[in-house]
Each structure stands twice: as structure tokens, then as C-alpha cells.
Image (cartoon, grey):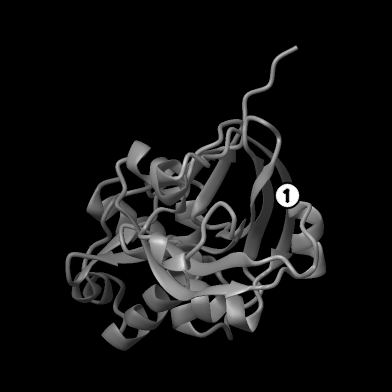
Amino acid sequence: MERQQLLAEIRSRIDAFETGIPLHKKLKMALQDLIISNRIKRGSTLPGERAVAEALSLSRVTVRKALELLIQDGHLRRRHGAKTEVSVPVEKSLSTLASFSEDMVARGLEPGCIWISKEISRPSPAEAMALALPPNADIIRLKRIRTADGEPAAYETAVVPAKFLPSPELVGDSLYEALAKRSALPQRAIQRLRSRPASVRDSELLKCAVGSPLLIIERRCFLADDQPVEFTETRYRGDLYDFVTELSR
């Protein structure tokens, strides 16, 4: 959509909202409607704050507040200084066993992680059951935020029996690289999916609004001989991910 047409559409939508709604929320809702309806294309760059403010006769503070709300909800992101870009969801296949890093690289995004903790511990009852371990077994528990082009995309807790990975320090940015080096790369997996709203803690870690949708995937991974090698819970930001699977009859 051309700039002047975009600004005209925004003005039309703002004018259509009932009175009593703060201007920054009207602008936020107008832009959100255009993004969701794909009138503003994913990956496109919005005009600068000053240009929007002048064209719509709004203050820059009003425009900035609206954009910040959209950034918090995952519809926009800041790129290259002052530029504001419409977020592009990451497509993740549910039928292929791949690491987060492999998914990101395949889509031209830079994978990264922010470590929360790496520890040797005992398994929780759920972890022990998933990995067929006794309660006193040693496990490696890894907690981290996974990023795509520097933006938080998922919060992951991975558990691996210590017999396959004796030290958490063996893991760099990729758990699967560490497991491959020890001939313990998963060959198949069983996944369970559910949804839930983001908690306050999720919001802090993933930079999303409290109550925004998360997709939770629990994955049990096995070696070729069916030994459980990994149990992972990943909380994906619903606004950044599209999950894709192929079905056939």
C-alpha cells in the first residue's frame, strides 16, 4: 500500500471509532486492523513517527504510545534504529524433527539464545516419567530464551539425562550440536500441544503482553533404539509463529 493511501486508511478508521477512546488507542486499533487484514504487508516498514503525526494531526507522543502498544503485542518491531517494521511470523513445521536453530537458519533468520540457567539436578516427577528415569538420576536442565534476529520468540526448558550429556557446559548455542557430538542426536519425537495465556513471568521473558496467546509444545525425543534422550517444554509466542503441518488421505 502506498504511503498516502495508508495514511488515508488510518485516518478513515480512526474517524470511525466512537468518541471517548483515547487517540493513541484509536491509532493502535486502526493499525492493528490493517495488519491483521494484511492491508499492511508483513515485513513492510511504516512511515516515521513525525510523518504519521503530521499527516494525521496527532502529537508524536500519541503516535509513539500507539506504536509501543503494537510492539508489545508483537505486531511491530523496531529495526535499524528508528525504523518500525511489521513483524513476519516464523513458520514452524510440526512434522519435522528439527532444532530451533535449524528452523531459524532455514528461514533466513539469525538464531540466538539468552541463557536463564544451566544446571545438574534431579528430575521432577514429570521429567522422570517422560525420560524413564529413577527419582535419584542426574539430569541436565537447560533454561533459555530463544531469539530470532535478536527478538525473543520462545522460552525453552530442556532436560537431558546426564548419561548422554554429563555437563551443561558442553552446550553452546545448540543443544542438538552437543548431543550429535556425543552420538546422542534424537531420531524421533512425540509432541503434545496446548495453548495458554502468557503469565506475568512469560511476559517478562518473552517481551509480550500479559494474557497474549502462547503455544506450549512438550516434546519427548528418542534415540534409534528408543531410549528417551530429551524432554523439552517450549513456550512459543503466538504472535510470532505460524505452525504448519501437511496432511494427506
Looking at the picture, tell me which residue is in the foreground, 228 or 74.
Answer: 228
Q: Quadrant of the C terminus?
A: top right
> Could you say which is closer to the camera, residue 129 or residue 219?
129
Residue 87: x %, y % from top left: 39, 55
Q: In which quarter of the view is residue 84 placed?
A: bottom left
Residue type, label 1 = Leu
Which quarter of the picture shows residue 140?
A: bottom right
Q: Does residue 108 appear left or right of residue 234 in this picture?
A: left
Q: Is residue 55 above or below residue 175?
A: below
In the image, residue 133 sits, relative to residue 29, either above or below, namely above
| Image quadrant where one finds the N terminus | top left
The residue positioned farthest toward the top in the image shown: 249
Instruction: Report if residue 27 is visible in the image.
Output: no
Residue at figure coordinates x 78%, y 52% from the top left: 132
Label 1 packing within 10 angstroms: few (<14), some (14-19), many (20+): few
11 up-or-down from 41: above or below? below
Give the mark count: 1
* Residue at 32 percent of width and 49 percent of height: 43
Q: Residue at x 40, y 53 (%)?
A: 174
- Give whichever of 23, 121 is nearer the camera: 121
Tell me where residue 150 appears, x and y as whole percent: 32, 64
What residue would you read off at disc 1? 193
Q: Is residue 193 visible?
A: yes
- Write down the quadrant of residue 70 in the picture: bottom left
Name the secondary structure under disc 1: strand
Q: Position of residue 160 (x, y in %)?
A: 60, 57
Q: Residue at x 29, y 52 (%)?
A: 110
Q: Position of residue 138 (x, y in %)?
A: 65, 67
